[in-house]
Image (cartoon, helix red, strand yellow):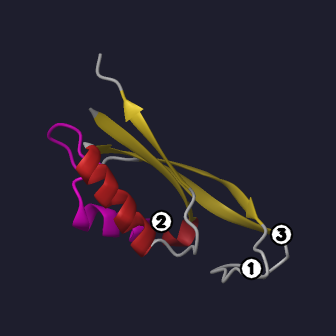
């Protein structure tokens, strides 16, 4: 069983986040290839609460940020969990937006 991780990141931070993931996990591996991922650009929106400590923006004010959506395969359960831990440790946001999907083998 393998998994796919999708996360959103400010464009200026994407390379550093990916480097952290690739240096500490085997995520992004497909056969004889490493560091494989797909990236699309978009605009993320959020409004930090008064209790938040935002990397970008101010409390109680809507913020719009040019972000990358990054998709990569993470392998099995253990490496996927490790990849999410690394993502959270290297990502600039206080709360990281991410999704994990199980990939079926056909």
The single residue placed furthest to the top in the displayed view is 106
Disc 3 vs disc 2: Cβ atoms closer than 8 Å? no
Q: Which quadrant of the structure image shows residue 38?
A: top left
Closer to us: 77 or 36: 77
Question: 3 or 70: which is nearer to us?
Answer: 3
Q: Position of residue 37 (x, y in %)?
A: 38, 47
Q: Residues within 10 Å of mark 3 (few under 14, many from 20)?
A: few
The answer to whether residue 16 is left or right of residue 43 is left
User: Which residue is at 84% across, 77% downward?
Assistant: 60
Tell me if residue 12 comes above or below residue 25 in the rendering. Answer: below
Magenta span of residues = 14-34
Label pair 1/2, CB-CB below 8 angstroms: no
Mark nearer the N terminus (1 vs 3): 1
Is 104 positioned to the left or the right of 29 in the image? right
> To which residue does mark 1 refer?
57
Tell me where residue 58 appears, x and y as whole percent.
78, 82
Q: Label 2: which residue?
A: 14
Mark 1 or 2, which is nearer the eye? 1
Q: With respect to residue 69, does 18 lie above or below?
A: below
Question: Is residue 18 shown in magenta?
Answer: yes
Question: Label 3, on which residue?
Answer: 62
Q: In which quarter of the image is residue 84?
A: bottom left
The x and y percentages for residue 98 are: 52, 53
């Amino acid at each position: 069983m393998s998994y796919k991780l999708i996360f959103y990141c400010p464009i200026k931070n994407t390379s550093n986040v990916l480097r952290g993931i690739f240096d500490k996990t085997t995520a992004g591996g497909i056969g004889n290839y490493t560091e494989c991922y797909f990236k699309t650009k978009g605009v993320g929106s959020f409004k930090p609460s008064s209790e938040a400590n935002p990397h970008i923006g101010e409390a109680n004010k809507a913020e719009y940020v040019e972000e990358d959506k990054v998709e990569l395969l993470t392998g099995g359960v253990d490496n996927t969990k490790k990849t999410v831990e690394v993502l959270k440790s290297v990502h600039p946001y206080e709360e990281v937006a991410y999704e994990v999907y199980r990939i079926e083998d056909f």
